[in-house]
Image (cartoon, grey):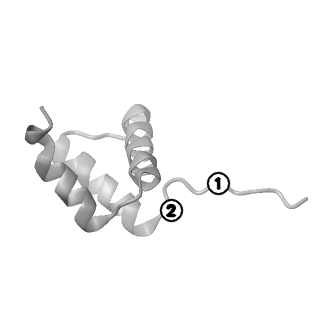
Amino acid sequence: MLLGHLEGFLNYCRTKVRLGVVEAVNGNIKAMVCRGRGQKNLHYLLLKAERMAATKTEFLVSRKAA
């Protein structure tokens, strides 16, 4: 069972991507799919996700000053 995921384990050791970042990206993509902003196919969805990651403007939250 673990041997089937060996390549994924090795990739994690090489790149050291934090799991919090991965979960944030997954959450943003799930939110984008739920909003249904006209994703006609998988290519368009991936293009929107790439744009969102590059510009970081899709999910900005403004905070009120105390």
Q: In percent of the image, x 28 and y 40: which residue is there?
A: 39
| Residue hosting label 2 | 57
Percent of width and height locating residue 46: 24, 51
Disc number for residue 13: none
Question: Where 1 falls versus 23 (above or below)?
Answer: above
**CA gap, disc 1 and disc 2:** 9 Å
Percent of width and height locating residue 7: 12, 52
Query: Which amino acid type is shown beneath numbered disc 1?
Result: Val
Query: Which amino acid type is shown beneath numbered disc 2?
Result: Thr
Q: In percent of the image, x 86 and y 61: which residue is there?
A: 65
Which secondary structure lies at badge 1? loop
Which secondary structure lies at badge 2? loop
Position of 55 with respect to 42 (left or right) is right
Disc number for residue 61: 1
Image mark count: 2
Percent of width and height locating residue 63: 75, 56
Q: Residue furthest right?
A: 66
